[in-house]
Image (cartoon, rainbow, N blue to C red):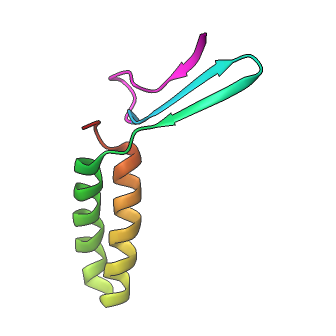
Amino acid sequence: MMNLLTLGQSSLPMKAIEIEREYPTTKVKIRPSTSGAMKGLAIGASIGRTCGAEATVVGAVIGGCVGACVGPED
């Protein structure tokens, strides 16, 4: 198995995505981070709170999704 790209190095912020190439297929492993999702949710909701209720919900959803992908592995 040849490992083409691993984004688990400390210099890169995205630690939850790993891409492997095994001829003829490519495998993508996504390990969600609950702690990153919770931090992103809190930050997104607090930013959205300044613009109203709808913005709070949108900020929480976007922040949670980004936090799950970019946050540290659990």
11 sits to left or right of 21: left
> 47 left or right of 5?
left
Rendered-image quadrant of the N terminus? top right
- Residue 4 is situated, as x and y percent measured from the top left of the image, at 60, 17
Looking at the picture, does residue 30 appear above or below residue 54?
Answer: above
- Horizontally, residue 56 falls left or right of residue 6, namely left
What residue is at 27 percent from the left and 50 percent from the top?
A: 34
The quadrant in which the C terminus is found is top left
Identity of the residue drawn at 31% across and 43% down: 71
Residue 5 belongs to magenta span:
yes
Residue 14, located in which quarter of the rendered image? top left
Q: Which residues are magenta?
A: 1-13
Q: Position of residue 31 (x, y in %)?
A: 40, 39
Report the front residue among 67 and 33: 33
Quadrant of residue 57 in the image?
bottom left
Magenta stretch, overall SS: loop
Direction from residue 9 to residue 22 in the image, left or right: right
Above or below, 30 relative to 22: below
Give percent across and percent down for residue 22: 67, 17
Q: Return the residue found at the far right.
A: 24
